[in-house]
Image (spheres, rainbow, N blue to C red):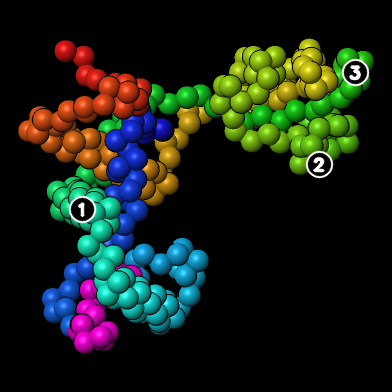
């Protein structure tokens, strides 16, 4: 079962949003330090912890907190030096700060409108819908014996007809990598094997083997089918995260459409508009 949506430029913004850490849920935002007389709050430490390089995730919790605190204090120190140097008054800096504010608002809006309201029940419901809408494929469980010539293959068939055990013959005769395992190929669906092999395997009845050797690019095969069944759907826990991402993406696109319906957007640079159209084609009228 594959749950997916077309990739659009808007999914880049979604990825940025989802990359941010959990929202701080502080009932009392206490002061944990001061720098130059200015307070440093617990919430800022929480934000710093979510922003640590992934390599810090392997550290014990107290060491992660120490690393985050050290980084936060360093940021605050240099920031005060930058303010003292007048960098906060620069127009380019103000535009960058405005962008960062917009991005933070973008993320907060998505979190409050979508992320916090996505329930496990909604994910399970989508899983059930996808399972119901995905017709099962037939898959076979097969073994094979691979040899180099038609003559050798026919000799193997004759031995099987004479009552020899398939698994033991595979271990003894097969030149394929599955030979030591008695030729076991496990379960496979259509499209997994070369066409000649697949056609012969799916045509066999369970418990039978090919009376005529099957030639492929790898050599000559004698194939035995041990079982046929419908492919079972993946377990919920295997695809839950994938489904959750899809639901978040769908709801993010809904938020975007609502915003576009409510607020006019005009790209005044024609070249940039043309570039935008290549990744976000305009909707058909």
According to the picture, the residue beneath numbered tag 3 turns out to be 149
| Residue 8 relative to residue 23: left or right | right
* Residue under the image location 24 percent in, 80 percent down: 40
Image quadrant where one finds the N terminus = top left
Q: Position of residue 133 (x, y in %)?
A: 32, 26
Q: On screen, 44 above or below 232?
A: below
Instruction: Name the mark nearer the viewer: 1 or 3.
Output: 1
Q: Which residues are magenta?
A: 31-48
253 drawn magenta:
no
* Residue under the image location 39 percent in, 24 percent down: 135
According to the picture, the residue beneath numbered tag 1 turns out to be 98
Looking at the rendering, which quadrant does residue 280 occupy? top left
For label 2, the SS is helix
Distance from Cα at disc 1 to Cα at disc 3? 73 Å
39 drawn magenta:
yes
For label 3, the SS is loop
Of the image marks 2 and 1, the number of the one nearer the N terminus: 1
Q: On screen, 180 above or below 5?
A: below
| Residue 200 relative to residue 72: left or right | right
Residue 225 at least partly seen: yes
Distance from Cα at disc 2 to Cα at disc 1? 65 Å
* Crowd around label 1: few <14 · some 14–19 · many ≥20 (10 Å): few
| Residue 22 relative to residue 216: left or right | left
Q: Position of residue 33 (x, y in %)?
A: 26, 86
Image quadrant where one finds the C terminus = top left
Q: Residue furthest left?
A: 262
According to the picture, the residue beneath numbered tag 2 turns out to be 180
Of the image marks 3 and 2, the number of the one nearer the N terminus: 3
Looking at the rendering, which quadrant does residue 185 occupy? top right
Q: Position of residue 94 (x, y in %)?
A: 22, 56
């Amino acid at each position: 079962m594959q749950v997916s949506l077309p990739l659009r430029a808007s999914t880049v913004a979604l990825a940025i949003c989802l990359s941010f850490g959990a929202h701080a849920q502080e009932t009392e935002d206490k002061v944990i330090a001061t720098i130059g007389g200015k307070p440093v709050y617990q919430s800022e430490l929480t934000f710093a912890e979510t922003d640590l390089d992934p390599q810090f995730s392997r550290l014990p919790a107290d060491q992660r907190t120490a690393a985050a605190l050290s980084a936060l204090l360093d940021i605050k120190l240099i920031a005060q030096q930058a303010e003292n140097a007048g960098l906060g008054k620069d127009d380019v800096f103000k535009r960058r700060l405005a962008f960062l504010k917009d991005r933070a608002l973008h993320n907060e809006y998505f979190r409050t409108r979508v992320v916090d309201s996505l329930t496990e029940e909604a994910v399970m419901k989508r899983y059930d819908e996808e399972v119901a809408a995905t017709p099962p494929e037939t898959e076979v469980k097969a073994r094979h014996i691979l040899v180099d010539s038609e003559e050798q293959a026919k000799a193997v068939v004759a031995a099987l007809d004479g009552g020899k055990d398939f698994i033991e013959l595979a271990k003894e005769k097969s030149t394929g990598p599955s030979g030591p395992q008695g030729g076991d190929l496990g379960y496979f669906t259509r499209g997994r094997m070369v066409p000649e092999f697949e056609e012969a395997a799916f045509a066999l009845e369970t418990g039978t083997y090919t009376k005529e050797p099957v030639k492929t690019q790898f050599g000559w095969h004698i194939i035995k089918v041990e079982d046929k069944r419908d492919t079972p759907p993946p377990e919920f826990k295997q695809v839950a995260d994938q489904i959750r991402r899809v639901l978040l993406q769908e709801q993010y696109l809904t938020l975007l459409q609502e915003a576009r319906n409510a607020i006019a957007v005009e790209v005044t640079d024609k070249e940039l508009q043309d570039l935008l159209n290549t990744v976000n084609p305009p909707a058909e009228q």
